[in-house]
Image: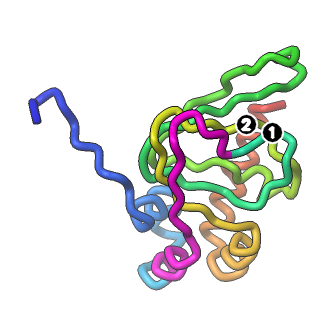
Amino acid sequence: MTTNEVSRQPLSKRDLLSRLVPPQLTNEKALSGMEILLKEEEFDPNFRIIIQGQPGDKMYFISEGDVEIVSRGAFAMGRPERLAVLKAGDLFGEMAIVLNRPRSADVVALTPVKAFSLSSGDWQHMKAFFPGFAVHVEEIAARRVGINK
């Protein structure tokens, strides 16, 4: 490896959760409990992970790779419009789970993607047993709803 190359190791469940949950809102026991609920998934480039308008059943935490958030909404006049590119350490799909509404955009893998998913049922468990995490994810969803208006 040259000095210009950067080794990019996938983020672990613990790494992702530690980035998403402020340290004052959790502890080691809580992080271990949250890790159990996350399921590993892999997606090939160009795979549409989320389809706009479909009901949401999971949210995703990116361990490795990049995804594109694409809207086919009124502002795009039916043409796909790139809203964002997310990378390792980011999450997506939370708006449909947190707000209990259809998916607001497509999410497409730009590179090979490794992610950890959290089902809507396990989201309810997280809300009950790990409220600090839930509040933080709800804040992210609220900010994104404001951006997408």
- Left or right of 95, for residue 13: left
On the image, the x and y values in percent for residue 66 come to 49, 37
Query: Residue at horizontal 11%, vertical 36%?
Result: 1
Highlighted magenta segment, given as a residue range? 30-49
Residue located beneath label 2 in the image = 106
Tag 2: amino acid? Asp
Viewer-side residue, 42 vs 101: 42
* Camera-side residue of 91 and 30: 91
Vertical position of residue 74 compared to residue 16: above or below:
above
Q: How far across and down, in percent of the image, does residue 40 sit?
A: 51, 64
- Please tell me which residue lies in front, 126 or 27: 126
Q: Label 1, on which residue?
A: 52
Q: Are marks 2 and 1 in contact (CB under 8 Å)?
A: yes
- Determine if the magenta segment contains residue 36: yes
Question: What residue appears at the point 75 percent right and 67 percent down from the top-left corner?
Answer: 120
In the visual, does 72 lie left or right of 36?
right
Q: How many marks?
A: 2
Secondary structure beneath label 1? loop
- Horizontal side of residue 106 vs 36, given as left or right: right
SS for dot 2: strand
Residue shown at 53%/59% (left/top)? 41
Question: Which mark is first along the chain, 1 or 2?
Answer: 1
Position of residue 118 measured from the top left corner of the image (x, y, whole percent): 64, 65
Q: Is residue 136 above or below residue 110?
A: below
Q: Is residue 83 magenta?
A: no
Dividing the picture into quarters, in which one does residue 130 lie? bottom right
Q: CA distance from mark 2 to mark 1?
A: 5 Å
Q: Residue furthest left?
A: 2
The image quadrant where one finds the C terminus is top right
Q: In percent of the image, x 69 and y 74: which residue is there?
A: 122
Identified by mark 1, the residue type is Gln
Scheme of image coloration: rainbow
